[in-house]
Image: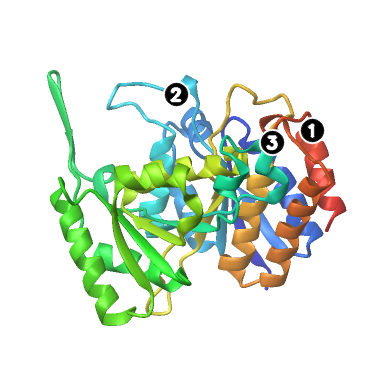
């Protein structure tokens, strides 16, 4: 029986990069059944909400979800009662129980010159950011009055332990746990739980605790020192975007959002580029599709166990860049179609 993948093109450049990703998947021999649904701003325009019950149900029953990008100025508002495209992302993560977001950051030698940092700073960098995705301030109680507002940041011991276990399982030498334990009570609990799990189950892996401001500084001063970074939702959101720029462009970074299946239940993962919807270039045919292709590769690896096919896609992207492929965000003039043909040519 063919595997089923839900496509969520979303907004802006989303539809322009998700269609080529399906081309790449077909070229590498991934024979899936695809079903497309409106999501984010497109869903607000069509249905009044960023994520409909129908779309969430379709995602729950699928084998994987491939998501492009959401958001744009037309839906920006400070009205707390108005729908926002980002609510679709939060609803999808919570509705599927996707608590672990994985963002690998490995600058390619062919793109060292595209990074804002010197080659000697980024050379040898190969890190993974493991971000807790369904807790913290993004999901805490929100209160708004005419004269004030508050957002509650809350974590439980179980939420911290399960994301820390993912990080230790992915590490080869060191886990850097990032918090703000000198100020925040949630961070003090975070540090305590991560330390206890390390002692109990993962003593062979080195563990260090780093304050978030220090971690942000070290990401741009000495990124190659990191192996796996694990942190809470908001810190992970910010640090992973910072780390993305080591590669030279947000258009180069994929991500995987995963849950933990239990009692025979299968939880589909969501695979998406780190970048946004880039409304300023939407419709011009110049969007960089490479992070979308690499997200499809993560889907092959983590969603379907198709390691050979995943490696083939990643190798094709590397080879195309080594041959000189550069989209505008990387300092070149290749179109989305030209970038797609270059990658297909190396498969």
Residue 321 position (above or below residue 312): above
Judge left or right: residue 126 versus residue 134. right
Q: Residue 230 sits in which quadrant? A: bottom left
Whole-Å distance between the Cαs marked 1 and 3? 14 Å
The colour scheme of the drawn protein is: rainbow
Indicate the secondary structure of the residue bearing disc 3: helix
For the residues marked 3 and 2, what is the alpha-carbon distance in whole angstroms? Answer: 20 Å
Q: Mark 3 points at which residue?
A: 16
Q: Residue at x 78, y 65 (%)?
A: 29
Q: Quick one: 133 or 77, which is closer to the camera?
A: 133
Q: How many marks?
A: 3
Residue at 68% of width from left, 69% of height from top? Answer: 2
Q: Nearer the viewer, residue 60 or 188?
A: 188
* Tag 1 residue: 334
Closer to the camera, 103 or 301? 103
Which quadrant of the rendered structure holds the N terminus? bottom right
Q: Residue 66, image x and y in percent?
A: 58, 52
Looking at the rendered image, the disc whose residue lies closer to the viewer, 1 or 3, is: 1
What residue is at 46 percent from the left and 62 percent from the top?
227
């Amino acid at each position: 029986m063919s595997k089923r993948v839900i496509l969520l093109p979303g907004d802006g450049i989303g539809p322009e990069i998700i269609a080529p990703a399906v081309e790449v998947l077909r070229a590498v021999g991934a024979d899936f059944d695809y079903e497309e649904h409106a999501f984010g701003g497109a869903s607000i325009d069509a249905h009044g909400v960023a994520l409909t019950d129908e779309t969430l149900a379709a995602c729950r029953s699928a084998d994987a979800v491939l998501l492009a990008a959401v958001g744009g100025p037309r839906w920006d508002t400070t009205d707390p009662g108005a729908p926002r495209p980002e609510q679709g992302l939060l609803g999808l993560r919570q509705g599927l129980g996707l608590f672990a977001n994985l963002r690998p950051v490995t600058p390619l030698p062919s793109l060292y010159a595209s990074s804002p940092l010197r080659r000697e700073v980024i050379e040898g960098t190969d890190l993974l950011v493991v971000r807790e995705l369904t807790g913290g301030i993004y999901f805490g109680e929100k209160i708004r009055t005419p004269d004030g507002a508050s957002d509650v940041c809350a974590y439980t011991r179980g939420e911290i332990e399960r994301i820390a276990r993912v990080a230790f399982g992915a590490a080869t030498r060191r886990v850097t746990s990032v918090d703000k334990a000198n100020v925040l009570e949630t961070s003090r609990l975070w540090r305590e739980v991560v330390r206890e799990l390390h002692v109990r189950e993962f003593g062979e892996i080195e563990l260090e605790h780093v304050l978030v401001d220090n971690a942000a500084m070290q990401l741009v001063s000495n990124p190659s020192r990191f192996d796996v970074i694990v942190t809470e939702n908001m810190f992970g959101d910010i640090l992973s975007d910072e780390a993305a720029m080591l590669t030279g462009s947000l258009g180069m970074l994929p991500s995987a959002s995963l849950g933990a299946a239990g009692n025979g239940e299968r939880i589909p993962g969501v695979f998406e580029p780190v970048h946004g919807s880039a409304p300023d270039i939407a419709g011009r045919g110049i969007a960089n599709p490479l992070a979308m292709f690499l997200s499809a590769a993560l889907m092959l690896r983590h969603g379907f166990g198709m390691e050979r096919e995943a490696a083939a896609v990643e190798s094709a992207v590397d080879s195309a860049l080594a041959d000189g492929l550069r989209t505008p965000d990387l300092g070149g003039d290749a179109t989305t179609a030209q970038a797609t043909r270059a990658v297909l040519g190396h498969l």
